[in-house]
Amino acid sequence: MMLLAKAALGLGGTFVLAGAYTMREGVIRIDVDEFRSGGSHVHMWVPAAAVPMVMQLVPEKHWRHASNHAREVMPILHAIVKELKKYPDAEFIQVDDGDQHVRIRTHEGRLQIDVDDPGEKVHLLCPLSTIEDVTIQIEDHASGA
């Protein structure tokens, strides 16, 4: 009985530590709602730390293809992310046109994009550190590292 309790405690502790590690950078939140007959409603919450980890599983041939297509824009994207991190709470774009609204900003170190249209709503929230990690991995593969 005591052995079973120790095993359960060890397994529980492992799950807690794995969850804390995975959630340390926050979550990527994607919400898409279409307000029409048969419209889609997609709501995803993904641990931000999982994205760079999963990218390690991408086959090399796909990395080469993506790196070739992204080679020209990667330095610009990397610079943009670096600069965005200097403004953890800033409004960059806000457009209000009747019942259509677009807002792009950083909030608490995350990129937030909100698009509200009469027929649909799209909301994206992603930590800037995750975007930076992804750009670094793509640049590393582009340089052959």
Image (cartoon, grey):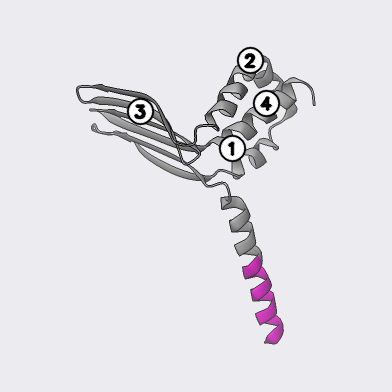
Q: Which residue is mark 2?
A: 69
Magenta segment: 1-13
Q: Is 12 in the magenta? A: yes
Decide which of tag 2 and tag 1 comes sooner along the chain. 2
Examine the rendered structure and indicate whether residue 62 appears above or below residue 89. above
Q: Main secondary structure of the magenta part?
A: helix
Q: Which residue is mark 1?
A: 129
Q: CA distance from mark 1 to mark 3?
A: 20 Å
Q: Looking at the image, which residue sits at the far left?
A: 98
Decide which of tag 1 and tag 3 comes sooner along the chain. 3
- Under circle 2, the secondary element is helix
Q: Which of the pair 35/111 is nearer the observer? A: 111
Q: Is 34 in the magenta? A: no
Decide which of tag 4 and tag 2 comes sooner along the chain. 2
Examine the rendered structure and indicate whether residue 136 appears above or below residue 97. below
Mark 3: which amino acid? Arg
Mark 1: which amino acid? Ser
Asked if the residue under mark 4 is in contact with the one under mark 3, i.e. CB atoms within 8 Å, the reply is: no
In x, y percent, where is residue 101? 28, 26
| Foreground: disc 4 or disc 2 | 4
Asked if the residue under mark 1 is in contact with the one under mark 4, i.e. CB atoms within 8 Å, the reply is: no
In x, y percent, where is residue 25? 57, 46
Examine the rendered structure and indicate whether residue 74 appears above or below residue 122. above
Decide which of tag 3 and tag 4 comes sooner along the chain. 3
Examine the rendered structure and indicate whether residue 50 appears above or below residue 132. below
Mark 4: which amino acid? Ile
- Under circle 3, the secondary element is strand
Q: Residue at x 62, y 24 (%)?
A: 78
Q: Looking at the image, which residue sits at the far right?
A: 145
Asked if the residue under mark 3 is in contact with the one under mark 2, i.e. CB atoms within 8 Å, the reply is: no
Q: CA distance from mark 2 to mark 1?
A: 23 Å
Q: Which residue is mark 3?
A: 103
